[in-house]
């Protein structure tokens, strides 16, 4: 249990997980943002959702991925971003498993909308499970030491203490 607590509070390990997961989501978002129509077609290939919902998801999902990427990369609202990435990755993983179970030979649609690249398979499920584990790790971690959120809060706390001290000195 001590090793788990140590890993959860290790600022460098948390930073590594944040940056790696953030970079994956950044790269995944960029192609989708530039071509939402092709991304909607990639979503349609899974044959799970109606086309109208695919269009909405193709418009919103990449921006959510980009927002999570920046939040993780810079260490802002890490727990919320980890929860969102975990939820997205879980949905993506179930979609891939469903497509594999139904024998669909389709492109993942993860990093490029080129249908000849990155076909779905059990390797993609394994990759997603690894990223889900990273998201869960970040969700339960408390190592915020190397984040903008920690930097801002520590500066605010120092400013508040100095302001309280100055106020006491002036009134006394």
Image (cartoon, helix red, strand yellow):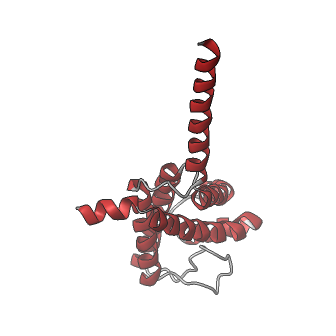
**Front in this rendered view, residue 24 or 37:** 24
Q: Residue furthest bottom?
A: 116
> Can the viewer see residue 158?
yes
Q: Residue furthest top?
A: 171
Which image quadrant is residue 2 in? bottom left
- Residue 172, position as x, y percentages in the image: 59, 13
**Front in this rendered view, residue 92 or 73:** 73
Q: Residue furthest left?
A: 1
Q: Number of callouts in the render? A: 0
- Residue 70, position as x, y percentages in the image: 64, 58
**Quadrant position of the N terminus in the picture:** bottom left
Please tell me whether residue 21 is drawn above or below residue 171 in the rendered image: below
Which image quadrant is residue 28 in? bottom right
Please indicate whether residue 4 sits to the left or right of residue 74 in the image.
left
User: Residue at 72% across / 63% down in the picture?
Assistant: 33
> Can the viewer see residue 51?
no
Please indicate whether residue 113 sits to the left or right of residue 76 in the image.
right
Please tell me whether residue 168 is drawn above or below residue 75 in the rendered image: above
User: Residue at 44% across / 83% down in the picture?
Assistant: 123
- Residue 68, position as x, y percentages in the image: 59, 57
User: Residue at 28% across / 66% down in the picture?
Assistant: 3
**Front in this rendered view, residue 2 or 132:** 2
Please indicate whether residue 124 sits to the left or right of residue 31 in the image.
left
**Front in this rendered view, residue 54 or 60:** 60
- Residue 50, position as x, y percentages in the image: 57, 58
Please tell me whether residue 3 is drawn above or below residue 100 in the rendered image: above
């Amino acid at each position: 249990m001590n090793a788990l607590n140590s890993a959860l509070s290790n600022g460098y390990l948390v930073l590594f997980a944040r940056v790696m997961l953030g970079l994956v989501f950044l790269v995944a978002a960029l192609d989708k943002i530039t071509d939402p129509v092709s991304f909607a077609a990639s979503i349609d290939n899974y044959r799970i959702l109606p086309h109208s919902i695919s269009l909405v998801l193709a418009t919103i999902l990449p921006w959510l991925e980009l927002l999570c990427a920046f939040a993780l990369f810079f260490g802002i609202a890490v727990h919320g971003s980890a929860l969102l990435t975990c939820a997205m990755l879980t949905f993506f993983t179930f979609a891939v498993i469903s497509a594999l179970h139904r024998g669909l030979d389709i492109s993942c649609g993860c990093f490029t909308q080129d249908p000849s690249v990155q076909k779905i398979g059990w390797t993609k499920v394994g990759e997603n499970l690894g990223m889900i584990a990273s998201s869960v790790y970040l969700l339960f971690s408390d190592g915020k030491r190397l984040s903008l959120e920690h930097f801002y809060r520590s500066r605010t706390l120092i400013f508040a203490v100095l302001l309280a001290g100055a106020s006491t000195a002036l009134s006394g």
